[in-house]
Image (cartoon, rainbow, N blue to C red):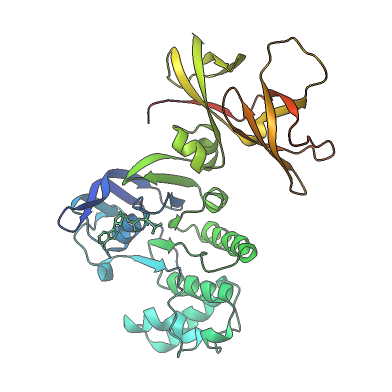
Amino acid sequence: MKIKTRAGSVVFENVTKTYGLGAVTAIDNVSFTINPGELVTLLGPSGCGKTTTLRMIAGLEHATKGKILIGGKDVTQLPATDRDVSMVFQSYALFPHMTVLENVAYGLTVTGVAKAEAHEKAEEGLDLVGLAGYGRRLPSELSGGQQQRVAVARALVLEPEVLLLDEPLSNLDAKLRRQVRTEIRELQQKLGLTAVYVTHDQEEALAVSDHIIVMNRAVIAQQGTPRELYEQPASGFIADFIGDANLVGAELVEVEGDMAHIEIGGLRQTLPHRGLGIGPVNVAVRPDAIELSAVNGESGQSSLKGHITHAAYLGNQMQYSVTSDIGDLFVIDPHIDAPIATGDEVRIGFSGRGLAVVPTDE
Ligand code: ATP
């Protein structure tokens, strides 16, 4: 194979970026390490600073303070043209008057690579993204998903130390998004590339990443593997951003080793205390961790009860809105054969999984 992989690391050391002479702090003293061969996603709500972070790796923006290293080399002051990275943009940014092959070879030819060699590499790049034989077409003769794959091939032939992807799927429809994200992930793993991927779609981030850095208001809110973020959210914000969560007020009443006894609306649960002490806490409860059962006749027990205010059938699950003493709850229930009707009274319970204690102060 002519195309080589040179996976580099990316390190941010106390990086701050301000715009408008300090009026806007887009990134506030952020540090992280991306290891060679990893796909790391920068995830967060609009305006959190993820695009600015990606553009600083690319050299399209420069840090106001701090240090950026790529492949162990300090690139903080280097312009984009002197960095070993290539970027895939959400708009594809293909040249419409050039053939697909010329588009993929373009970056090589402008850096002085002989045409024959550039075209050979471009053919190989197209082959890698499953577009062998499409080289003679114009971009307008390809579908959106195919154009995005051309953009990926164009980035790959430059043999970057780091591949940057800026919301690469946002111009595609939902089904195609799933397919193309799988292709990008498979290619990244096959070639062992270091990739930094920006998205605001949490499902996409969970699906493609080795590691996710969740940003909020210019800082890192939490980073970890998809499973760590989903199962051990550090805050109510993370619990709600990575998947849905009901944030419920509770009381931590006793600590025993790593575990704590928690009272939630009169129900007692034993959960990891995660460093929190006795007193009020919040519990992030996944919608599928709530179990509802119909209240049959008179029941004097002091269990937690609620009322169904809305029931929706979604084919493979029921979704309920429930009012209760612990607040309004959103519930997902796979038992579609015995749906509960709007207005019914229900008893509320929790399954063992899908509950995490988080601090109240945010
Ligand atoms: P989105 O998902 O909407 O693209 P983002 O998380 O990528 O958001 P950034 O584009 O990095 O966020 O922006 C972070 C902050 O910096 C925002 O408050 C934004 O308004 C501001 N900002 C970004 N670019 C500039 C600029 N060129 N001049 C001034 N402010 C900017």
Taking the view exactly as shown, the residue that stands out farthest to the left is 21
Rendered residue at 60%/17% (across/down): 269
Decide: is 212 above or below 71: above
Decide: is 40 above or below 150: above
Q: Would you say residue 258 is visible in this rendering?
A: no
Given residues 328 and 360, the one toward you in this image is: 328
Residue 167 percent across, percent down from the top left: 46, 62
Taking the view exactly as shown, the residue that stands out farthest to the right is 337
Q: Is residue 26 left or right of residue 286?
A: left
Residue 28 percent across, percent down from the top left: 26, 45
Q: Is residue 261 left or right of residue 27?
A: right
Residue 192 percent across, percent down from the top left: 49, 57
Q: Is residue 5 left or right of residue 303?
A: left
Decide: is 211 above or below 270: below
Taking the view exactly as shown, the residue that stands out farthest to the front is 343
Rendered residue at 53%/81% (across/down): 123
Q: Would you say residue 10 is visible in this rendering?
A: yes
Decide: is 142 above or below 48: below
Q: Is residue 33 left or right of residue 138?
A: left
Q: Quadrant of residue 108?
A: bottom left
Q: In this figure, what is the number of numbered marks?
A: 0
Rendered residue at 56%/75% (across/down): 144
Rendered residue at 77%/49% (across/down): 315
Quadrant location, ligand no. 1: bottom left
Q: Quadrant of residue 195?
A: bottom left
For the C terminus, give its image quadrant.
top left
Given residues 323 and 201, the one toward you in this image is: 323
